[in-house]
Every structure is written in structure tokens, then in C-alpha cells.
Amino acid sequence: MSQHELRIDVTDLSREQRRVLEEITGCHLAGVRQLTIEVPGAGRQSARERPSQTVEEWTSILDELTDDQVDAFDRVVSGRARLTRNVP
């Protein structure tokens, strides 16, 4: 069993838990003793880890926006700065 694979003993589930898992899987779980759930790709990156970002990724954020959209974005960002700092 991989670290992102979970085996559930169906006989230990409450009626509500079984119903939820039946909705998720689309299968009736009566008579099923064990359910295995695997999350593919979950092991590639921890929830706390973030992929490294390049300067190019950050500087290209506004590339697809029109001048009006960039101006609107600038107004929002400038306004937020005044909310978090004591700016004279």
C-alpha cells in the first residue's frame, strides 16, 4: 500500500459514512468488506511544499491583460496597501 492509498473496513463505517462513500464511488457497498482509495499524484508534492517560482512567472502575470485591466488591477493593489500599512 502506498502512502497515498487508504484502505477502509466498510463494516466499521456508520450508515452516513457508507452513504457518502457510495455517492463518491457510484457503487453500492453492501457486502463489500474493504474499500481502497488511492489518490494518484498526491505523493509528488507535499501540501506544505510549493513548487519553486521563477521571476519570469511573476513578471508575466499581467501579460494577457489589456491596459484598462492593468490599470484596474493597479488601483486594487494600491488600495490594499493602504489597508495594511500606515501610509501618510
Image: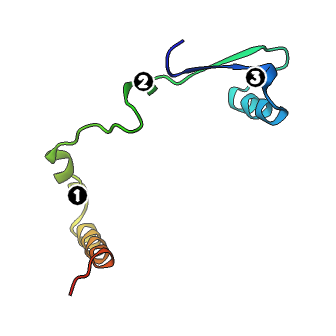
**The N terminus: image quadrant:** top right
At label 3, counting other C-alpha atoms closer than 10 Å, the crowd grade (few under 14, some 14-19, many 20 or more) is few
User: Marks 1 and 2: which is nearer the front?
Assistant: 2
- CA gap between label 2 and label 3 equals 26 Å
Percent across and percent down for residue 51 are 28, 37
**Sequence-wise, which precedes: disc 2 or disc 3?**
3
Which residue does the numbered mark 3 point to in the structure image? 27
Q: Against 9, is 45 above or below?
A: below
**Sequence-wise, which precedes: disc 1 or disc 3?**
3
Which residue does the numbered mark 2 point to in the structure image? 43
Q: Against 36, is 26 above or below?
A: below
Q: Do callouts 1 and 3 mark residues in contact (Cβ within 8 Å)?
A: no
Q: Can residue 28 be seen in this view?
A: no
Percent across and percent down for residue 2 are 50, 15
Assign a secondary structure to mark 3: loop
Q: Do callouts 2 and 3 mark residues in contact (Cβ within 8 Å)?
A: no
